[in-house]
Image: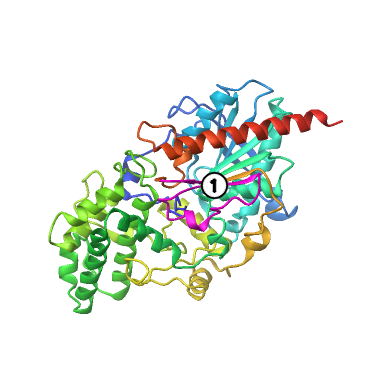
Amino acid sequence: MKSVFGALRLTLLTAEFLQTFSYSNVKTEIHESQTQPLFKEKYFTQSLDHFNFNSMGNGTFLQRYLITDKYWNTGYGPIFFYTGNEGDIWEFALNSGFLTELATQQEALVIFAEHRYYGKSLPFGNESFNIPQIGLLTVEQAIADYAVMISALKRQMSATDCPVIVFGGSYGGMLSVYMRIKYPNVVAGALAASAPILSTAGLRDSRQFFGDVTADFEAISSECKYAIKGAFHQLKELVERQDYSKIQSAFTLCKRPSSVQDIHQLNGFLRNAFTFMAMLDYPYSTHFIGNMPANPVKVACETMLRGSDLLTSLRDTAAIVYNSTGLLTCFDVSSLYVECADPTGCGLGFDSMAWDYQACTEINLCYESNNITDMFPAMTFTEEERLRYCSKRWGVIPRPGWLKIQFWGDALSSASNIIFSNGDLDPWANGGVRKSLSSSLIAINIAAGAHHLDLRGSNVADPASVIEARKTEADLIAQWVELERNRIQRLP
């Protein structure tokens, strides 16, 4: 999920971004990062395998987490714990200001935990993505990591009576839901922002995602949608004539395409740019994963409609994502976009390998575009195609129904104290819970909200809807904290 996964997935990283962005180097096991003094960067000694006592020599690894007690009423205030997702934990900490804003109100300790196999939390170093070492990358292991870390840190910090609320966005939001379901003894409540727990469990139409991306652009104007669709049609006509030189020239490609696979790669590259802009359609410029202007969907539509040459417009629109600095002189499509088991994009580097593996095992992302319910070229990704790819790439057979069995799917009525927030602009939203299921399973829908906008820090450009959503979330969390504190006090 760029994507979530991301998108968010939230993790489409452009080549230029990888070249210009870096985090502070780890020099000691526990140290304070120079990137953001608010948080201290530390490492927790974590079990490699929580469920098999003979696995991998009963080994451990160092799991990174970020922590600040700046706002904490020591030993009494709640603990706000971010369940890290598919990327470097600093990326999420620096783009989830709501947690620290809420911590100032509720005197909370704030912790951002990095997901195993992402960022610097690599259980086997650079060999983490070899077989069989990669096999310890599962949702179950990840949330067990978090439960163990929370329990240990509470003991270490004399915080055993402090209620814990988990937060997460996108895939991280899914993990927050799963934490509350599986470890209610550890977690008192969860805020799951933009968490597509239904679509990733195979409970939504495979056409929904790219249809919703299309709807975002159509909402700006129907002319925008048809211009994009028309540009892709012109590209298709060039392919049918095998006019690869014209394609290279039109899109300023570093290499001349020469095969059906090259065109498939180009279509995925272009489609992914629109996905990224729809997800991150914030009302102000951002530097989350890459660089986005304010209202990127609107900017994209203006770009698509400003000239008569649709192919040039399509190229320039993709450049909003892939060449935000203008430094690239041509597009190396194969390095800027890597096809994987997530049709919305896996990103690049080690993080992309980890997400690809998860999309091949537990996370079901069989989404397709069809050029009928959406504006993109017809590109399928069926269960059969997923099986073939994953068997060849990782030697695994996907389990399409596993999340529904293991984490309940849409049968959530017996759960409690979970907020499901979704923004109406987010193409992941309809893969999540949009209606409240009980008095403590609350759905909050945010008009004019993009991908987990409510987790971001306050901004003068915020729509009224997200301001109200954050207030509701704060009130509910305060109630859950008080209820949990009272429960703990009643214990013998």
Secondary structure of the residue carrying numbered label 1: helix
Q: Is residue 347 magenta?
A: no
Residue span colored magenta: 422-447
Q: Give the residue displayed 35% in from the left and 47% down from the top.
A: 281
Nearer to us in this view, 276 or 126: 276
Q: Quadrant of residue 55?
A: bottom right
Q: Give the residue displayed 30% in from the left and 75% down from the top.
A: 260
Q: Residue furthest left?
A: 308
Q: Which quadrant holds the C terminus?
A: top right
Q: Residue furthest bottom?
A: 241
Amino acid, disc 1: Gly
Q: Give the residue displayed 36% in from the left and 59% down from the top.
A: 215
Q: Is residue 466 above or below residue 48?
A: above
Nearer to us in this view, 81 or 205: 205
Counting from the top left corner in percent of width and height, residue 352 is at 45, 54
Does residue 405 appear to the left or right of 233 in the view shown? right
Q: Give the residue displayed 64% in from the left and 42% down from the top.
A: 146
Q: Looking at the image, what colour scheme do you see? A: rainbow
- 10 Å neighbourhood of mark 1: few (<14), some, or many (≥20)? many
Q: Is residue 440 magenta?
A: yes
Q: Which residue has dot 1 on it?
A: 172
Does residue 121 appear to the left or right of 144 in the view shown? left
Q: Is residue 185 above or below residue 158?
A: below
Does residue 64 appear to the left or right of 156 in the view shown? left
